[in-house]
Image: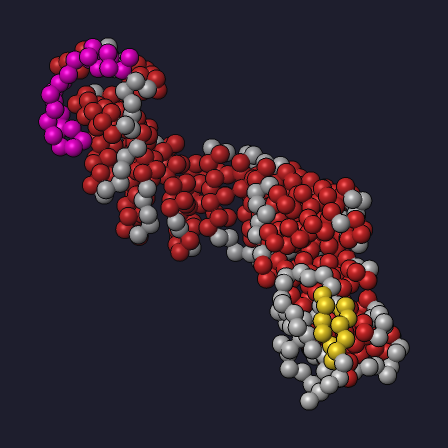
Amino acid sequence: MNNSPVVEQVLPPWGNSETCNDSGFRPDGLTLELNQPEVVPQEKVMLDVSSVHFLEETDEEQLSKRILVLSRTNKVRSALELLGSMELSGLRPNLHACNSLLSCLLRNGLIDDGLRVFEFMKTKKITTGHTYSLVLKAVADAKGCDTALQMFSKMEKEHEVEKGFDAIVYNTMISVCGRVNNWLESLRLWRSMKKNGHTGTRITFCLLVSIFARCGQNELALDAYGEMILGEFEPGKDTIQAVIGACAKEGKWEFALSVFQSMVKKGLKPNTVACNALINSLGKAGEIKLAFKVFDTMKSLGHLPDTYTWNAILGALYRANRHDNALRLFESIKRDQDSQLNSHLYNNALISCSKLGLWEKALQLLWQMETSGVPVSAASYNLVISACEKAKKPDVAVQVYEHMVHQKCIPDTFTHLSLIRVCIWGSRWTEVEEILNVAGCTGCIPLQCSYTRNVLKRQDFFGKEALRENAQPRSPTGRENKGFDASELEKRLR
């Protein structure tokens, strides 16, 4: 029976040292009787003095090197026990050794032990920004962004800890927030960083631009980019592409174009997304020539135009009122890259047909959409009806409407208004009555709507005596309808 005296001594709470079965240095007899809280200050442990390993080597640098080697080879238990033995002997490991051990514990998933070592390092005042970054990143990975933010906020309030913060710590937390798209906390961290006198690094600004652009905060992304340039940091390819996208969305096409051109001059290769964003922005601004120059540059860089590229180009041609060119380009896409056709491209072509009144071409495109399996929305049918309206083809418009209903596509307000206009022009009074009744019942066109009244008044609907003596043509639903008094309808519209 062992009758050796037992001594109670205050030691750092290493705990959980039995989790790794390594074969490195181990002072026999060190027994730890601890619970496993998340963050523990110094604990009391019971040691059997007769079995405690007293270190013959007392050179702190040599012992620190041993901890360093054990940590790098993942000898977790041995490294922890050596650290505990040094503490017993009144010896202090250096910063490099402690950071290495901390990193070893965290990468092996021993979060609680890592936090205990972290507390020990704070007590001994041997922490750096790298120390805080290791801990915060591990906590974020294990317990989520919110927990890491809570820990960071607590550290910020501790004066001694806050003095050890540097740009690396802030970068770590900004990156953690970016992974969950928490741009508000990223912004707060950026402001706190500047308030506390820390200068952002290239990584800081690259992270901020990326996060803000990804979260749709384009003005903030451009602000971060501006500070990056003022700080004379060289933006990377991803950062520049994010800036181009942010500029495009904000309508700042001149700035976007200058960034794009500088990127190309530096030998960087903008990706397809950045090219598409710039083409789209230039098209919206009516800069059709510049849009095509970027398109040519895009092809020279080896990028193949995709659906978004063609959509941006067709949109640019439409906004420049070059509808014939838009239709020719669409036919070229259909001939050479049929697989890229989708409802957006078809609708762009239908818009041009609508503007030019090419109802036959519009019907052809509608038939192609249906036979090729491309989804046909109410907007597509509306554009075909609008083309019939432009061409003064009420009979065809009504047939398209009936086909639309037959295809179980629900007409909307624009469908009914376009039909009303073309039917009034063609004196299709019964159809007008039917459309108003159906639209009024479904709520698509409120009869008290000022726009509805204006449409009818512009067509002199209420002054048409023919309405009272209409010839009862077939309605859009195929039913015969009784005539009605225009004065009654006018009362309902008031």
Q: Can residue 13 be seen in this view?
A: yes
Residue at x-position 67% and y-position 58%: 136
Q: In this view, does 288 lie to the left or right of 189?
A: left
| Outermost residue toward the right in this view | 59
Residue at x-position 24% and y-position 12%: 490
| Outermost residue toward the bottom in this view | 1
Say if 455 sits above or below 67 in the image: above
Look at the image and say whether residue 294 sits in the magenta stretch.
no
Q: Is residue 454 left or right of residue 45?
A: left
Q: In this view, does 474 lie to the left or right of 156?
A: left
Is most of the magenta stretch helix, strand or loop?
Answer: loop
Q: Is residue 270 left or right of residue 25?
A: left
- Horizontal and vertical percent position of residue 48: 74, 80
In the rendered image, the quadrant that contains the N terminus is bottom right
- Horizontal and vertical percent position of residue 84: 76, 74
Residue at x-position 46% and y-position 42%: 314
The residue lying toward the viewer, choosing from 105 and 36, is: 36
Say if 455 sits above or below 374 in the image: above
Q: Can residue 228 be seen in this view?
A: no
- Horizontal and vertical percent position of residue 94: 84, 69
Residue at x-position 65% and y-position 46%: 186
The residue lying toward the viewer, choosing from 318 and 123, is: 123
In the rendered image, the quadrant that contains the C terminus is top left
Quarter of the image for residue 188 reads top right
Q: Give the range drawn in magenta.
A: 470-494
Say if 225 sits above or below 111 in the image: above
- Horizontal and vertical percent position of residue 93: 83, 71
What sort of colour scheme is used for the picture?
secondary structure
